[in-house]
Image (tube, grey):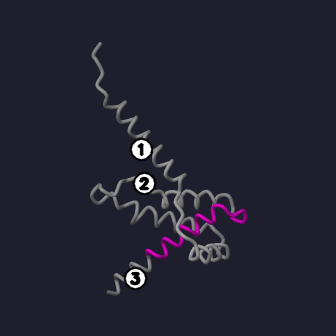
Amino acid sequence: MRILNATRQWAKAIRRDVVALWLAARDPRVPWHAKTVAGAVAAYALSPIDLIPDFIPIIGYLDDLIIVPLGIMLAVKLVPVDLMREFRDEATRRAKPVSKAGLIFMIAVWTVVAAALLWLFWPTRPA
């Protein structure tokens, strides 16, 4: 039961930090490099589409379990501590946003991958 409780607390902290990073990416007091990382991590984490779809066994969850938390840790380290504390406080009072930019980016990535695969494997006629 302790492990389940700890996992729930960790998941709540991750969700809170994603919203806090979303706020940090829009705040003028945050340095530009921290805004860039925070915005990218928040956009990906809040996007309804994953880079690696969850239905793919094992690797489908790698982005959710490894890539997103590592990105969050990096972005949190880049945002000044006092500002991050403020964003976390505000994030606990806000509803979880949805990233349209993240959705558009993931659709673009999948479109480019699909086009590249079609181009690569399309049968050609011998000359």
Q: Quadrant of the C terminus?
A: top left
Q: Position of residue 34 (x, y in %)?
A: 63, 62
- Residue at horizontal 54%, vertical 63%? 97
Q: Amino acid at mark 1?
A: Trp
Q: Position of residue 2 (x, y in %)?
A: 35, 87
Q: Which residue is mark 3?
A: 6
Q: On the rendered structure, is 18 left or right of 11?
A: right
Q: Is residue 61 above or below residue 4?
A: above
Q: In the current view of this chain or complex, which residue is farthest to the front?
A: 95
Between the residue at mark 3 and the residue at mark 1, the CA separation in whole angstroms equals 35 Å
Q: On the rendered structure, is 32 left or right of 11?
A: right
Q: How dense is the environment of label 1, judged by Cα within 10 Å: few (below 14), some, or many (20 and up)? A: some
* Of residues 43 and 65, the one drawn nearer to the viewer in this rendering: 43
**Magenta segment boundaries in residue numbering:** 11-30
Q: Is residue 84 above or below residue 2?
A: above
Between the residue at mark 2 and the residue at mark 1, the CA separation in whole angstroms equals 10 Å
Q: Which residue is mark 1?
A: 110
Report the mark closest to the observer, 2 or 3.
2
Dot 2 and dot 3 residues touching (CB under 8 Å): no
Q: Position of residue 107 (x, y in %)?
A: 45, 46
Between the residue at mark 2 and the residue at mark 3, the CA separation in whole angstroms equals 27 Å
Q: Which residue is mark 2?
A: 49
Q: Earlier in the sequence, mark 2 or mark 3?
A: 3
Q: In the current view of this chain or complex, which residue is farthest to the top?
A: 127
Q: Main secondary structure of the magenta part?
A: helix
Q: On the rendered structure, is 27 left or right of 16?
A: right
- Residue at horizontal 46%, vertical 63%? 68
Q: Quadrant of the N terminus?
A: bottom left
Q: Amino acid at mark 3?
A: Ala
Name the secondary structure under disc 3: helix
